[in-house]
């Protein structure tokens, strides 16, 4: 895979590739146009205002996982376009958070019948659309097992089916069912069919249904036609507006983490210490876990020189993975980690005082724009 990045990029740096981002967004636009569904960006996985104007060309708005994400979307996604919607969900709101959401979110999602009863009437009174999240009991998370399965046993997400008969459905505009994670089309279609088969009586009480995120639209092999057909059939049957809220599915393979080898070492195996860290800069590598792809690298044994890559923190487990390269790595070598737009910089941290990577954009004309760099002051500020 050939990736042309300017050698002037200071590392570590997250870089968003706008050409690849736009190609992903074209898929979302096709789904919107062919199915009639609305598509939102889930900002929990990706939130870089520098490219929000590009994303706003293709999407209907955003969906947030809390007050601050909702405020960011309101202020930066498409602040001058009233047609762009801001949705917000939280497992539980505080009184203070709910009060501030007036004027910020157009659609407010409640996690339970209890939260709906507490805040739903006030949300309706101030003109917001009200949604109730259900737990459909449909597990199709293909990443991370129960860690990322919204319908895992004991999950705190969504009202259970046995409680839905007692809900005041006059308060509810939207039924919400988020049950997927990096799912292919069979998972997306399966969820839609599950809601139609098991929750149809409640679908008939609302005006829209949000099938959540986890639809991995741009993953090779995802059958977009199957998703479109299922969305159209569902909307035709129930006369409702369908929504999707993908996050990673919109930015998959559209960004990189550029890193430099700081030093090499040997302890039974060859080791390379990078200025990028798994624990600080790509936490999903440890949480899922998985081994990220690197441009020009192979799996152990595939190329001439095997090496284990790790960050320069003091955590023993800050290991990115085992790889092989055509040449032995040396200090100053640059490595490009692929698929680093989703769940990377939105989850990073400054453990050990590790510097946060720069945020940059590779525009379609090949121009690199540094959006933000971070220093000691950012580390100290976070510690008070």
Image (cartoon, helix red, strand yellow):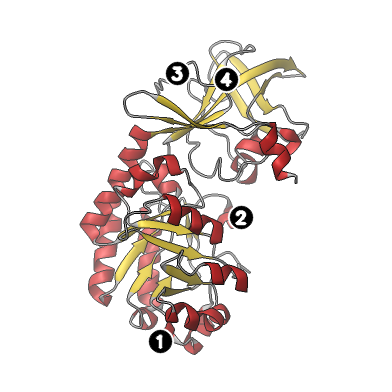
Which disc number belongs to residue 6? 3
Crowd band around label 2 with a 10 angstrom C-alpha radius: few (<14), some (14–19), many (20+): few
Find numbered disc 2 in the image and state the secondary structure of the residue it sits on. helix
Q: Please tell me which residue is depicted at 42% across the width and 85% down the height of the picture.
A: 169
Q: Mark 2 points at which residue?
A: 147
Sequence-wise, the earlier of marks 2 and 3 is 3
Q: Which of 262 and 378 is in front in this view?
A: 378
> Which SS class for mark 4?
strand
Inter-mark Cα distance, 4 to 1:
60 Å
For discs 2 and 1, the disc positioned in front in the rendered view: 1
Of the two numbered discs 1 and 3 on the same chain, state the one appearing first in sequence: 3
Residue receiving disc 1: 170
Circle nearer the N terminus (4, 3): 3
- Distance from disc 2 to disc 3, alpha carbons, whole Å, reads 37 Å
Residue 262: percent from the left, percent from the top? 67, 18
Does dot 3 land on a helix, a strand or a loop? Answer: loop
Distance between the alpha carbons at the discs numbered 1 and 3: 56 Å
Q: Earlier in the sequence, mark 4 or mark 1?
A: 1
User: Is residue 160 at least partly visible in the picture?
Assistant: yes
Element under disc 1: helix
């Amino acid at each position: 895979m050939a990736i042309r990045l300017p050698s002037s990029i200071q590392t570590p740096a997250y870089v968003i590739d706008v050409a690849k981002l736009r190609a992903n967004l074209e898929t979302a636009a096709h789904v919107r146009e062919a199915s009639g569904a609305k598509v939102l960006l889930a900002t929990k996985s990706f939130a870089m205002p520098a490219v929000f104007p590009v994303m706003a060309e293709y999407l209907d708005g955003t969906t947030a996982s809390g007050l601050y994400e909702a405020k960011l979307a309101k202020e930066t996604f498409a602040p001058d376009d009233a047609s762009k919607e801001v949705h917000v969900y939280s497992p539980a709101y505080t009184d203070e958070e709910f009060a501030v959401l007036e004027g910020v979110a157009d659609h407010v999602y409640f996690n339970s019948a209890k939260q709906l009863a507490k805040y739903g009437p006030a949300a309706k009174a101030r003109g917001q659309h009200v949604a109730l999240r259900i737990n459909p009991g449909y597990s199709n998370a293909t990443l991370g097992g129960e860690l990322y399965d919204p319908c895992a046993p004991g999950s705190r997400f969504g009202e259970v089916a046995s409680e839905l008969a007692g809900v005041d459905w006059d308060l509810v505009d939207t039924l919400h069912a988020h049950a997927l994670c990096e799912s292919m089309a069979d998972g997306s279609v399966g969820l839609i069919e599950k809601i139609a088969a098991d929750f149809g009586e409640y679908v008939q009480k609302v005006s829209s249904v949000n099938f959540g995120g986890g639809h991995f639209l741009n993953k090779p092999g995802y059958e977009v036609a199957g998703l479109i057909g299922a969305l159209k059939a569902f909307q035709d049957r129930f006369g409702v507006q369908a929504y999707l809220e993908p996050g990673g599915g919109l930015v998959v393979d559209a960004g990189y983490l550029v890193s430099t080898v700081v030093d090499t070492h040997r302890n039974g195996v060859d080791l390379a210490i990078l200025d990028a860290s798994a624990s600080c800069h790509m936490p999903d590598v440890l949480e899922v876990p998985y081994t990220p792809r690197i441009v020009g690298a192979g799996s152990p044994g595939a190329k001439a020189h095997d090496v284990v890559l790790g960050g320069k923190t003091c955590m023993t487990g800050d290991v990115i993975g085992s790889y092989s390269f055509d040449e032995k790595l040396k200090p100053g070598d640059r490595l490009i980690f692929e698929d680093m737009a989703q769940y990377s910089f939105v989850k990073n941290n400054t453990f050990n005082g590790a510097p946060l990577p720069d945020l940059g954009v590779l525009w379609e004309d090949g121009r690199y724009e540094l959006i933000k760099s971070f220093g000691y002051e950012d580390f100290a500020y976070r510690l008070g």
